[in-house]
Image: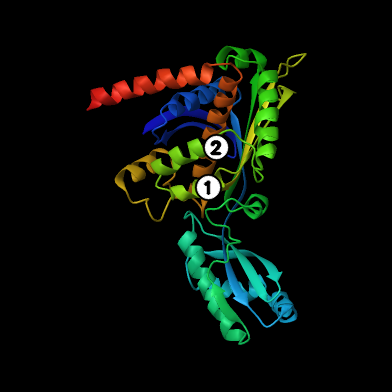
Amino acid sequence: MEWVGPIKLQGDLNEEISLPLATFETPLFASTARGAKLSRLTHGITVTLLSSSMTRSIALEGPDTQSLRTLEKTLNLDLLNPIVLKTSRFAKLINIQTEILGKLIYIRLVFSTGDASGHNMATQAAEAVLNFLLEQNKNLRYLSISGNICCDKKTSAINSLLGRGKSVMAEIFIERSLCEKYLKTSPEKIIELNTKKNLLGSILAGSLRSANAHFANILLGAYLATGQDAANIVEGSQGISFAELALDPKNAKTPPSDGLYFCIKCPNLILGTVGNGKDLTFVQENLKKLGCLEPRDYGKNSERLAMIIAAAVLCCELSLLAAQTNPGELMRAHHLLERQANKNMGQNK
């Protein structure tokens, strides 16, 4: 585990902050650090929180579609939220989404869960709703507390479209001269690679609403260092990288500088700052250094953590794409950095 940064942030966060990454792929430290350095040489990375929620989908069986359609029309927040509020001080039902298939109904319950990732909180609340519906509708039969349209620890269109966890956007503008000096490439080469590798390559591979080089690498490192359920990198790895030529939006020079606009969208960052795994000593120390254990408003610590991690994803995604525009650079860097890391670990023993 190493601390990387600082990363310069603006937008919903406005500060410079480092973060811990825990991984055996040691070149990720240097790669993320390169992106972080660019953030400090530019206006910074703009982070924007788009949404925050946790879902659980209950599955029930009825006599026919007509009766399930009648049930569907009765479901609303006023009916179900009082039941949810009895299960937790923090869980709140914020949306209800349904899918009917013949005699089956899947009810996707969307919760806000404060600073917890909310897996157990959502399941407990969903179970209370499930029991209520079974008591009120004797023609219904229990199928499952999780009907798989949640969709938990699996890639899916529904999570990418509707969100599960924190949905975050991170953006940066890099002047051409900085791109050439520190990334050893041009904006045009990064844009071409992103189009032909991330976008077209992902289409050819049949990727599901996902077009990126390696979001999962940074998510795993950040998740392990901050006590998260690492299996959630499955849906967390879904995301899109976008690049285009642009003019500096904050430069008053005439003509303004041209360069690279680069952004990433992480629609499914499932994480928390309280709950299972967060009581470990090193996790508590890391979260405290990140400023994610402060007495903030409901859910603000976990939202802060999500935006910091998304910025780190951008840093490493950008650095990797830059390396891949140059033949041989990726493997040379891996050899050099991994050998140095192994040497350092041997000395530490």
Task: Identify the residue at horizontal 48%, vertical 69% (top origin).
Answer: 124
How many neighbours does mark 1 have within 10 angstroms: few (below 14), some (14-19), or many (20 or more)?
A: some
Q: Which residue position is annotated with label 2?
A: 215
As helix, strand or loop, the secondary structure at mark 2 comes to helix
Determine the image quadrant of residue 205.
Answer: top right
Earlier in the chain: of badge 1 and badge 2, it is 2
The disc labelled 1 sits on which kind of residue?
Val
The picture places residue 111, in percent across and down from the top left corner, at 57, 62
State yes or no: discs 1 and 2 in contact (Cβ < 8 Å): no
Determine the image quadrant of residue 224.
Answer: top left
Q: Which residue position is annotated with label 1?
A: 234
Task: Identify the residue at horizontal 59%, vertical 25% (top origin).
Answer: 321
For the image, the number of numbered tags is 2
Q: Judge whether 311 appears above or below 104 on screen.
A: above
Residue 174, disc: none
Q: Nearer the viewer, residue 206 or 325?
A: 206
